[in-house]
Image (cartoon, grey):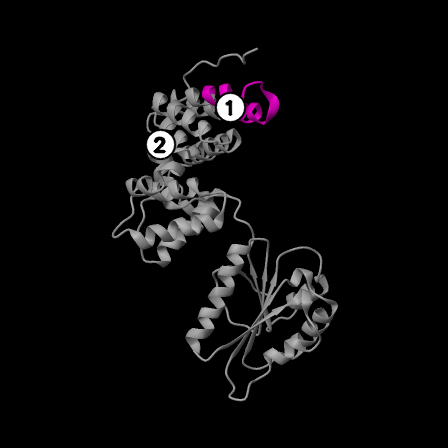
Amino acid sequence: MPQLVWHDVRPAPVVLISGTQDFLASRAVTGYRDFLRAEDPSLEISDVEADAYTSGELISFASPSLFGEPRLVRVSNVERCSDAFIEDAIAYLAQPAEGATVLLRHGGGVRGKKLLDAVRAASGVAVEVVCADLKKDAEKMDFASREFRVAGRRIAPGALRQVVAAFSDDVAELAAACQQLIADIEGDITEDTVTRYYAGRVETSAFTVADAAIAGRAGEALVALRHALESGADPVPMVAAFAMKVRTMAKVSASRGSSASSLGLAPWQIDRARRDLSGWTDDGLGVVIRAIAEADANVKGAGRDPVFALERMVATVASRGTLASTPEPW
């Protein structure tokens, strides 16, 4: 059975929307509703709660009405569905109603596995839309980039990175931040625009510290680090931001001339990494990679002072790997 991403609307009699990311799932449900309504504004929409389901409801809502309008049946809480729903839904797969689309929202877990297996085996009848959490920075960047692209708006790569860094903990917040910029700003969206709108969030972002350190601006990076920590930033994702940027730099440095697709990077990521590499040496990169690994261990409990570990890492990065290491304080 085809497995689709959350924004890929492919009509089918039955659509399984699976995964733990509720915001993306709601976007997927809305996408199907809008698609079907655009095809026929007379679309009838019905909502069913699978955990409070009683026998016969599904076929009742999906069956053709007097005037034959298309139907959309949205079924929630399938991960807590009743036995009656499992029985009716499996029977429905064998003979779906003409002109009806049934959306099954399953948020994860083992409940309803028999039904999920039946849906996934229903070739030609069902499709699955997977709404998994966006865990990788690249996934969050792709999500935010799509928000602006769909709206027909241009955003500078640095500005996009600022937005993602500031709202990376919550996809819904990230989407809201993107939509606010789209609604409020005319013309291209720049780094200054993002800073003006989300100064409190952007100033404390790990990428602000990392960008300054990689550019060799040690004083600015240390001040930004202190500001971030005083604003409640967690040392662990701070180190992770440095690791992500330096890892990309190392990948680009070692594969000069390679295409973006072969490196698994977006073109703008390669362009940014090439700019960041100015003034760096391969030896310096090696020293910094080891310093970041050491800092990662220290902020996760191996060291006595996470703040000192962060400051030492920032100083080493800002020196582009030329700073001699210092011992851990007693």
Give coordinates of residue 243: x percent, y percent: 48, 32
Prevailing secondary structure class for the magenta stretch in the rendered image? helix
Give coordinates of residue 265: x percent, y percent: 43, 44
Q: Which mark is residue 138?
A: none
- Residue at image mark 2: 276
Question: In this rendering, would 80 be left or right of 165?
Answer: right
Q: Residue at 46% across / 19% down in the picture? A: 312
Question: In this rendering, would 84 be left or right of 3?
Answer: right
Amino acid type for the residue under numbered disc 1: Arg
The answer to whether residue 9 is visible is no
Q: Residue at 66% across / 67% down in the picture? A: 50
Amino acid type for the residue under numbered disc 2: Asp
Number of callouts: 2
Q: Residue furthest bottom?
A: 66
Most foreground residue, 260 or 324: 324
Residue 58 position by quadrant: bottom right
State the extent of the magenta-drawn residues as a range: 290-312
Q: Which mark is residue 290?
A: 1
Residue 57 position by quadrant: bottom right
Mark 1 residue element = helix
Q: In the image, is residue 224 above or below residue 75?
A: above
Q: Is residue 200 magenta?
A: no
Label 2, residues with CA under 10 Å away: few <14, some 14-19, many ≥20: some
Which quadrant of the figure contains the C terminus?
Answer: top right
Q: Residue furthest left?
A: 187
